[in-house]
């Protein structure tokens, strides 16, 4: 009786062990993906938004340096903002950086857009505006900043496009596919696991002792008639 109780307890413990061993890795992966799903924004998308912010700050810094070098910030602000001239002012390049920042942050940080159309619009507008401005304006005759600001704005806009198209969207799509595959694997996982084989499940008859040679000789001696 004690042996049967011990075997039943051992089978239950083994059953629990089997269930834990099979379910623990999937549960851990589900928790990790659920934890990543609960984030307000993914890590790669956060990096993209930081780069968009860097774009605005860097162009602003270059524009302020250009104002200071040209003759002082108050004087040049009045000249470039209040007396704006498309052929000489850098103020529109600064506004172009503000436009990229506002559109991309609104689309990919606030609305969490998962499509490339917003970055396509900002890059197309930036590229077309800079090309036309360089051709029609007189920026190239205003020193180094006439070259630097358009080139930097052009390069930063296309780096943002590359980051989103080749880093953010593919990685987020891959993470979602892995999450769904792990979730489907958990749904297909059986609820009950087969227990281990116990001794009571099999019956073997007691072993029969084969007759030895001595027993046969004794049997023949008993069968001999008594003289």
Image (tube, rainbow, N blue to C red):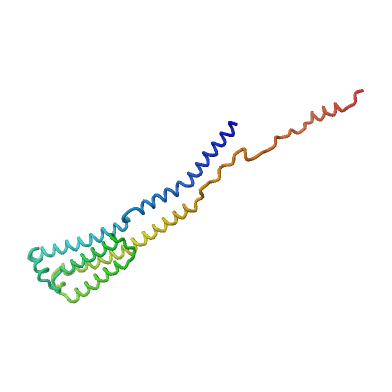
Does residue 179 appear left or right of residue 65 in this picture? right
Quadrant in which the N terminus appears: top right
**Could you tell me how many numbered marks the image carries?**
0
Does residue 116 appear left or right of residue 60 in this picture? right
The spot of residue 41 in percent (x, y) is 31, 56
| Among the 4 quarters of the image, the one containing residue 117 | bottom left
Does residue 164 appear left or right of residue 28 in this picture? left
The spot of residue 88 in percent (x, y) is 13, 72
Q: Residue at x 25, y 65 (%)?
A: 103
| Among the 4 quarters of the image, the one containing residue 139 | bottom left
The spot of residue 222 in percent (x, y) is 85, 26
| Nearest to the observer: residue 101 or residue 8 | 8
Q: Residue at x 62, y 38 (%)?
A: 200
Q: Please, which residue is most extreme toward the right here?
A: 227
Q: Residue at x 24, y 65 (%)?
A: 100
Residue 129 vertical position relative to residue 56 in the rendered view, above or below? below
Q: Please, which residue is most extreme toward the top here?
A: 227
Quadrant in which the C terminus appears: top right
The spot of residue 162 in percent (x, y) is 31, 64
């Amino acid at each position: 009786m004690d042996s049967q109780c011990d075997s039943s307890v051992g089978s239950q413990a083994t059953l629990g062990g089997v269930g834990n061993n099979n379910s623990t890795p999937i549960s851990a992966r589900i928790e990790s993906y659920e934890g990543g799903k609960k984030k307000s924004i993914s890590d790669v998308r956060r990096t993209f938004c930081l780069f968009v912010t860097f774009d605005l700050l860097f162009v602003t810094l270059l524009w302020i340096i250009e104002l200071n070098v040209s003759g002082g910030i108050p004087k040049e602000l009045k000249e470039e903002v209040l007396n704006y001239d498309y052929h000489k002012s850098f103020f529109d390049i600064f506004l172009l950086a503000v436009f990229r920042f506002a559109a991309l942050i609104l689309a990919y940080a606030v609305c969490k857009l998962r499509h490339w159309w917003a970055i396509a619009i900002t890059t197309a507008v930036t590229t077309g505006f800079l090309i036309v401005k360089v051709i029609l304006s007189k920026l190239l005759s205003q020193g180094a900043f006439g070259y630097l600001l358009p080139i930097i704005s052009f390069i930063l806009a296309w780096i943002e496009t590359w980051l989103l198209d080749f880093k953010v969207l593919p990685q987020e799509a891959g993470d979602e596919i892995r999450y769904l595959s792990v979730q489907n694997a958990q749904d297909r996982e059986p609820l009950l696991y087969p227990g281990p084989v116990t001794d009571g499940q099999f019956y073997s008859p007691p072993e029969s002792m084969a007759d030895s040679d001595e027993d046969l000789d004794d049997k023949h001696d008993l069968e001999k008639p008594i003289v």
